[in-house]
Structure formats: C-alpha cells, structure tokens
Image: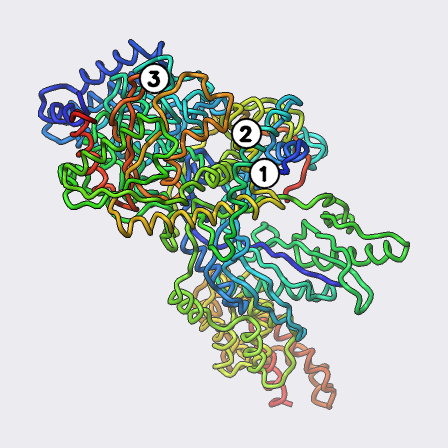
Amino acid sequence: MVVGLEVHTELLTASKMFCSCANAFGAEPNTQVCPVCLGLPGSLPVLNARAVELAVAIGTALHSRVGASTFHRKNYFYPDMPKDFQISQYDRPINEGGYLDLSDGSRVGIVRAHLEEDTGKSTHLGGTGRMHDAERSLVDYNRAGVPLVEIVSEPDMRSPEQARLYVAELRAILIATGASDGRMEEGSLRVDANVSVRLPGAPLGTRCEIKNLNSLRSLQRAVAYEAERQIELILAGGQVRQETRHWDEGSGETSTMRVKEEAEDYRYFREPDLTDLVPDPAMIARIRDGLGPMPAQRRAALASLARGAVVPGDVLDAVVGAGLDGFVEAAVARDVEATVALSRAANELAGLDGPGQVRPDAFAEVLAREAAGTLSATQAKAVLAELVRGGGEVAEIVERRGFAPMNADDLSGTVSQAVAEHPDEWARYRAGEDKLAQFFVGVVMKATRGRANGQQVLAELESRR
Amino acid sequence: MNALEIAARVRSGERSAVSVTEEALTAIAARNGELNVFVHVEGESALERAAAVDAAVAAGRDPGILAGVPVGLKDNLCQTGVPTTCGSRILSGWRPPYTATAVERLLAAGAVPVGKTNMDEFAMGSSTETSAYGPTRNPLNPTRVPGGSSGGSAAAVAAGMVPVALGSDTGGSIRQPAALCGLVGIKPTYGLVSRYGLVAFASSLDQIGPLARSVADAAASLEAIAGHDPRDSTSLPGPAPALIAHLDQGVAGRRIGIVRELVEGADPEVVAAVAGAAEVLAAAGATLSEVSIPELRLGLSAYYLIAPAEASSNLARYDGVRFGLRVAGSDITEMYVATRTAGFGAEVKRRIMLGTYALSAGYYDAYYGQALKVRTVMIEAFERAYASADLLLGATAPSEAFALGAKVSDPMAMYLSDVFTIPTNLSGHAAISVPFGSGASGLPLGVQLLGPARSEERLVAAAAVVEAGRGVPGA
Amino acid sequence: MSELTRDDVAKVARLARLHLTEEELDRFTGQLAQVLDHANDLRALDLTGVAPTAHPVDLGTVVRADEVRPGLVRDAFLSAAPQPEDGRFAVPRILGEEP
C-alpha cells in the first residue's frame, strides 16, 4: 500500500487572504464579504502579510526551502468559486521540499506547502440533501478567500496507521506554529488521501483520491478500506480506475465521486493582479528563530523528565498538543513525579479542553499537595477541575471545599469515638487482625465526610494499638 | 469652455457648478439621441454634487482643481449605485456597491460625473460598434466611428457635452478614439492610476486615463486621479506627478526619435502629420532623429494572445450566480452556458475563445508562453531606444475615422487599427495622443508621443508644444 | 496555416461555457485561425533563454497588514443578485464535483 496525503489548513489570520474581511467561522451567511471576495467586477486582490508569515512558519517547521514564489490563476467554473478561478501557487510555491518525522521513527517527504485561497460553501436543498439530486444549492461566500496552505506529501506512507501518525504530527506542528487551530471537524484542517497498491518492488499502481476525511479515525479507516478494495479488485482480475472517491463514515466505505476521464485543463497562468512574492530573508530568519521547539522535540524533553519511567505516547501527545509543557515542568520543579504531572496534565487539563483558567503555578501547587499527602488523588482532581473552570487560589478552594487536613486534636477525637463505638472490632484489631485498620479508616471517613486523611488515620490507629 | 477655465470660475465664485452641470446635461440631451454617447445619464445626483461644490465655494472652502467640471465616465468604471454595464448585456442593470479609486479621486477634486459613456463591449474593439447598446457615432461626422473602445468618452468631449472624460486603454482604447475625435488622450504608465474599480479586460495591460480637448485639461485630470493606491497591488508607489507644473516646460534640448515602425503603413496624411509635428518639436528646440525598432512589429500578434488570455479568465465570473444577467438552465452548467451565450456579443466570445485556446494544455508554450517572451523582447527594444532618446514620436492610428460598419465584420482589419498603440501597453510605458493635421476627408488626425515609465511630465510638456504648433503653416 | 480545427473550437467553447451554433463554429474557426496565423511570426522566433514578462512593472512583494475592515452590507449586493434566497445565492443543481 502506498499513501500520499494532501492537507489543506486554514490559516489563523484576522482577515482573509486578499481582502480585509474577517476570517472567522460561523457568521451569518454572506456577512463577511466585500467586492474582492465576492469577485465583483473591478475588484483587485492585495496579499495578507500575516498569511505569508504563517506559510513561512509552516515551511520552516517542515524543513522546506522557503523562497521566491509567484501566484497563478487556476481556472474552472464552480459556484463556490466567486471569480471562477482560484488564486493559488503553481510552478513556484513559497515552500518546496522538506520532511516530517513520525513518532514511529519513519520520515515522510514533503513535496510542497503553498498558499491559496479557500472557496465558499454550498448548501444543497431538495432531494436527499446530497449535491447531485438536490433541486438547487445556496451559496455562502463567507469562507471564500480565507487563506489556506496546502501541504502535499510524497507517497511515502505504507499503512493506515502511518497516514494517521503523519496527520497527527502535522496537526501538532500546525498548532505549535500558530498557523492553524487544527480543527478537522470544523473543516479548518482537511485531508485528501491518495491510495494505491502494488506488489512489493513493483512500480506504483493507479491511485484513487479519497475525500471527506473529517477525523484521524476516518482517515485511518478510509485508507484501510480503500487499499483492501483495490487489492480485492486486482485479485478478482479487475483494474483500478483513477478516480476521486468519497468516504462515508456511516457505511465505512468509499464510493466513486468522479472519474478522471480527461485531465482537467485549468489553464494556469500568472495572476496579473499580484506581484511576485519574495519573502524577506530577515522575516524568514525572525520566524525561524521565533518558532521554538517542534512537538517531537517537546515530547522528547517531557519524556526525559520521567528519568526512565515509561510514559505512554498518547499522554505526551495530549500534553504537547494542548501546549501544557510548562505546567508539567512547573510541577516537576516542585518535586512532583513527572509521570504523575504528565498524567494529570493529560487527563485533567487537556481532557477538559485545554488549561482553561488554571495557571502553571496553581497546577504545580495542587500536585505538590497531593504528593505531600495533604490532598487525596480524588481531591486533587476536583481542585484542578475547579481551577480549569474558573481559576482562583488553590488554598481558598481547598478550604472552601473542606479538603484542608483536620488538625491533630480533631482527628484524635474522631478516632477515639470510632474505637468507643466499635469495641469488638478494636479488640480484634489489637489482637493482630490488621485488615480491620481499613474498617476504622472507613468509619472515620464517614464521620468526617471524607475530610480526614487516610494515611493520618492509619498512623493514629497504629499509635494506639 | 475647457475644464481648467470652468474650475477657475467655479472656484472664484464667478460661475456656479450647478449652471455648468445644467449646461452639460442640456448638451447631452440635445445630441445623445443622434450620437448614442451616454448609456446612462446621472442628472439628479450630478446636480446635487454640483450644488455641494457651490456650497463649498460659498463657505470659503476650495472644492479642488476640477471644481464643478462635468466629466463623463467610461461605462467600465464603478461608481456606487450607478449602472455599470461595460457595453454588455451580461451586466445589464448591475449597480456596483462601491466606487473606483479613480472616480473617488475625481470626486475629491470637485469634479461632477454626469453619466456613463458607451464603449465596445468589455473594451474589446476599436470603433465602439461592439457595444450591446448600439454604436456611438463620431460627432465630427456621424457616418464615421469615434474610434474605440473609449468611443463614448471621446464623442462626449468632441460633442462638447463635457470637457473631460475618463477612458481606459488596453491596446490603444484612449489614444485611438482621441485621435479620431480630435482630442488629447493619455495612456499613463502602467500602475500610475489605480485599477481598483475598473472592470478588467486584460489586467496586465489596462490603464485608466483622460480624454480632453486640451493638453492642460488632460494633464490636470490625470494629476487628479494618479498616485499610489493600496487597494491595487500593481499600483506604483509615490504621489501623482506634478503635470500642470510641467506644461510649459517645452522641449528644448530633448532628444526625440521618430519611430519608423510607428508610421509605416499609415495613410499619407498621417505620415505627413507626424512629419509636421516633428518640425514643430524641432522648431521648439528638440533634436529629432529617425529610429527603427523592428521588434515593435511583433506587438500586434503578442497582444492578441496576451490580452485575450487574461480576458478569458477575467470574464469567467460573468456566470449568472452573483450579479448581472442569468438565463435559466436545468443544472449549473446549462445555466452558465445559457447565460454567457446570451450575455456576451460575438467579439467578446471570439476573444474569450482565443484566450482560452492560447492558455489550454498543449498550446500554452506555443502561443501564450511565446507571447510573454516577445513582451520581454519588446521591452528591451524600447529600453535600448530610450537610451538615446528622451521621447519617441509616431502616429496614433493608421487613418482618420473610418465609416461605421467598415471593419466590424473583419476582426483582423479591426485589430490592425491598434497597431501603433499596442506596443506601449505591452511595455507598460506612457504615451499621449495629440491632434495634429487632418485626413483626406478633413477629419482630425493624432500624433503619438511615447516615453518610458513615469515620463508623463516630459510627455505633457512635449504634447503642449505640438498642440501650440497645430496652427503653424505647413502643419 | 494554423492547425486550429473545428473540433478544437468546439472544445474551447465547452471550456469557456459558451454554446456556438454550427454556423458560428464555422465562422469562429476561420476567424480564430486567421489571428493564430498572424501569430505564427511569433512562433517562428527562437526565444530560448528569454525570460517571459507577465507584468510590465516589477514592484517586488506587495502586502497589506492583517487588519479587519467592515465589508459590504448584505443587502447592497444580494438584493440585486439573480436569485437571492435565505441570505445566499441560489443556483440550479450542481452536477460536477469541485476539482
């Protein structure tokens, strides 16, 4: 199986690629448009400097050659495309070449990562709601002209798992560079997969392009399904046709969208309304210097904090993906076990949709108290959840929730009461029946509604034995 | 009365802008039926604007160098709420929701747009006969064409309806009608005037410029609309050139080359006019010499590949989805085809087809790619010529105004009427056409002065010398 | 002579979303061939190594700051559209997929 991926990412700019309309998701239809992105006669494009910077950041992170480039028009009629041509880059993209290292140790080559503009969106009405049998479609141009970078990989992947790893790693890089929010479900990161099969050592087979891959899970399933389909077809004496196929998440199958009968004739030519794009070397250097470590390096750095203890890969992915490296480092600096800090960060912060209102020092404080035994694991998680939701001071939350440890006299009194109420059990405990310690801990916990610290209760029981 | 005189009187309070505008509207009403010059007259808003100019003067404010001057706008220039059709059925009824930079600047200079002038459909033509709204006639002889594609703007000035009009020049569309109507027309350096709001024909060639009865009026109008615009990526940096200040600079010491290729094949009267203009320039102290730039002969062929190629893409957006005409179809492609087939005229279809072909797979290198290289060759040839000449001189058009219908069924003959003007569009340089001499039928002729990029100050100074020498015996 | 055929013209018309009658196909083939013949003087030139000029002026990189400005009020363009519906532009059914 041979897989190459084309990933389109919307860039996190304030305005669109060639006009000053807002680049934002979810507005009322056709309310973020102007003469330029509606393609009205007489309008002209002017390139967004920030889109260029983000494209350079992506290219730098992917080890591409960043250089002089030009814009071309890709001509085709389609209602989502207001000018009936797309401004894209053709023979001189801003980023050429490069590679991406996957966490399984393999390296995927990058062909190019070029700038282009997004299209509008159609809603299909009548019929079943699918495009072809719709009675008519309604077009919204809010998304038209949103800046995109298209990242084209070499056909270097050999399994559905590798395809998933590639997109997961690329997504982490795009988020780390600040270029993208990486939201596949909102369509700000879109993946098309080119899949072909061949006997080992044979030349590449005919490929099919799969569209509508809205999640990493879809990607992995679709690539696996498609490769299997092609193998079965060939084993049955058939031939793979070059075509575009649509992934249906519900049925778990791909189906033919469009057969490439003749090569599309896009009549690419230089966009005469735009000048050459020659990124300033000083700007490239500034972006390269400002990028900071990429996710692979950050995962390695976090793993090294655990000093040999095994940290699951998905925990590292979650921490790096949510940008929580600093939280873990702050906790480790207070002598919290790195494995605990990583696990709490991954599960309690990243799991709750990012760090929210919590600051690294508060996170470290909670984990330090847990390590010292003054907070139980359950209590620590509850405090973290509250910090994520609304921030605040750790001490104040601990006090208000009644998690503060009981003072020694109160604890001693409660233990005395428990002993007095259960003389038989106490006698058996003193006679050497150790397992009854847990019975007394339970009684004390119940009486204090969980405020007592189990370790302290055990110590108190032992001292009276 | 010319534009600068009107502005002077309005600014001094001697005349009201409203009365000037009323006069213009009366002049339009008197002859528009016969000549078909304006496709849309904007009477009410023009009078309102004129009243605002008068109010500014009364309040002691200066409304600008074109205060109260009525102007015509070629119908490919957008003005908010004013119909803009580009002479095409496909844009019938379209009112742009925004205003072109050049028009904004005219308004800021106190000018009063009175309406939209007829043009060849999408500026594709040299006679204003391809307009969907009927041909415009030459006011100097209504059996003749006014030239094109800015023929409506030229006729509006020549008929005395307005002292100044804006046109656009992609292959000669300002200069050729200026010549055929006895006017001054300027094709500025590419990028000097913002194209924002000019409906594109061929983006790398289009420039907006003025047509006027005098060099001074044309210079003042260009000065008003020129200068950097951040909304056009191809706009030149820097402010507008100081053209009015250079009008009487003369040509003493200037080296002017008479270009053989910009005269050859022209009518004898045209050849004589160029010689006469050369004499006038020499008498004013310029050094004249004959030069040959054989590469210019390649211009026509390169132009008729590059311009249609860009046009085929620029005109794709007329698809019936967002604005303008829609003809129903049972699916999107049928609707596209029905709309475009009904909406575009034959000349536009011809050029879209030509351009689509020149860009299509298998032909790109042979046609469009080769034409771009020829463009390089021509620019280098011009640069060599400008190394030993400050300005160049030639004819604007090969003949005086021709009869309506004479060339409309023979595209190649029509295309040849742009042969002297096209090279300047390909090079992006500046050129001006000035009336000089007359043809066999007594209609005016134009001579063309060409200069390198941003040579407008030099050009208007030389043009003023030619203009002043028009009446000299022998000219 | 240019190698332009009637079939080429028909194919170009499809690409350009234009319908030509049989008579127009004949006429356009002749007229376009004439223009292309004229262009043969270009094709005959050896311009190997000559850089193409797509732009008459070289301005270098031109960019604008990433700032949001208000766009158009929807009614300013949608009310005049051929078929406005529910804040959007209605079109007849789309048969081909987006490339």
Q: Position of residue A256 (x, y in %)?
A: 76, 45
Could you give the CA–CA distance between mark 3 and mark 1, rounded to whole angstroms? 35 Å
Name the residue carrying label 2: B350
Q: Give left or right: position of A159 versus B184.
A: right
The chain identifier of the residue carrying mark 1 reads: B
The chain identifier of the residue carrying mark 3 reads: B
Label 2 SS: helix
> Relative to B1, is A3 above or below?
below
Residue A406 showing in the rendered view: no
Name the residue carrying label 3: B138
Q: Give left or right: position of A117 versus C20.
A: left
The amino acid type found where label 3 is placed reads Asn
Q: Position of residue A148 (x, y in %)?
A: 52, 52
Q: Observer-nearest residue: B465 or A34?
A: B465
Q: Position of residue A233 (x, y in %)?
A: 86, 54
Q: Quadrant of the C terminus of chain B?
A: top left
Name the residue carrying label 1: B357
Q: Give left or right: position of B406 versus B236.
A: right
The answer to whether mark 3 and mark 2 are in CB contact below 8 A is no
Label 1 SS: helix
Q: Establish whether labels 3 and 1 are both on one chain.
A: yes
Q: Establish whether labels 3 and 2 are both on one chain.
A: yes
Could you give the CA–CA distance between mark 2 and mark 1, rounded to whole angstroms? 11 Å
Label 3 SS: loop
Q: Residue drawn at (47%, 77%), measured in percent from left and top?
A: A330
Q: Residue drawn at (60%, 42%), measured in percent from left and top?
A: B360
- In primary-sequence order, the first of circles 3 and 2 is 3
In the current view of this chain or complex, which residue is farthest to the right? A236
Q: Quadrant of the N terminus of chain B?
A: top left
Q: Position of residue A152 (x, y in %)?
A: 61, 59
